[in-house]
Amino acid sequence: MDRHQWVKEFAGAVTVCDPHGVILEMNDRSARMFEEQGGRALVGSNLLDCHPEPARTKLEQLMEARQANVYTVEKKGVKKLIYQTPWYSSGRYGGFVEIVLELPSEMPHFIRRGS
């Protein structure tokens, strides 16, 4: 088994792009999430073209600064955590990865104290 095979059917949407915004990978959930925009056919296209302003400019700035962006959204009653962050290979900047996870409407929150 390919050691990266786990991500294919992972419950969250995972989309990976290179430093210029060209989509390199989409797992199954990501392809379904972006089905109306082309799904897996988006691989090879630039994700910046998929974002209207002002989101496009914000994403360009995040990618240039190599800065993470984390937030939640709610659409049609479904809450999601959006986690966009740079990824690296052998210490070299590789681009950005976006992970989208659906969140339950009610979720426990724990504060852990150090040991």
Image (spheres, rainbow, N blue to C red):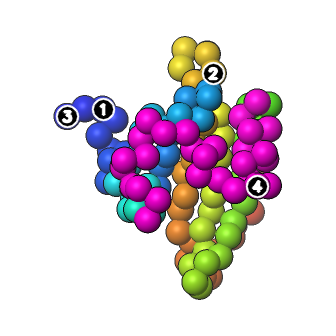
Amino acid type, residue under disc 1 in the picture: Arg
Give the mark nearer the N terminus: 2 vs 4: 4
Tell me the residue that label 2 is attached to: 93
- In the rendered view, tell whether residue 21 sits above or below residue 36: above
Which portion, as a residue range, is magenta? 36-64
Q: Is residue 38 left or right of residue 77?
A: left
* Distance between mark 1 and mark 2 Cα atoms: 21 Å
Q: Residue at x 43, y 65 (%)?
A: 36
User: Which of label 1 and label 4 is nearer to you?
Assistant: 4
Point out residue 106 in the picture as x, y percentages from the top left corner. Answer: 62, 82
User: Which of label 3 and label 2 is nearer to you?
Assistant: 2
Q: Secondary structure at mark 2?
A: strand
- Residue 55 quadrant: bottom right
Give the mark nearer the N terminus: 1 vs 4: 1
- The answer to which of 3 and 52 lies nearer the viewer is 52
Residue 107 visible to an observer of this rendering? no
Give the mark nearer the N terminus: 3 vs 2: 3
* Distance between mark 4 and mark 3 Cα atoms: 41 Å
Q: Secondary structure at mark 1?
A: loop
Q: Main secondary structure of the magenta part?
A: helix
Q: Secondary structure at mark 4?
A: loop
Badge 3 vs badge 1, beta-carbon distance below 8 Å = yes
* Distance between mark 3 and mark 1 Cα atoms: 6 Å
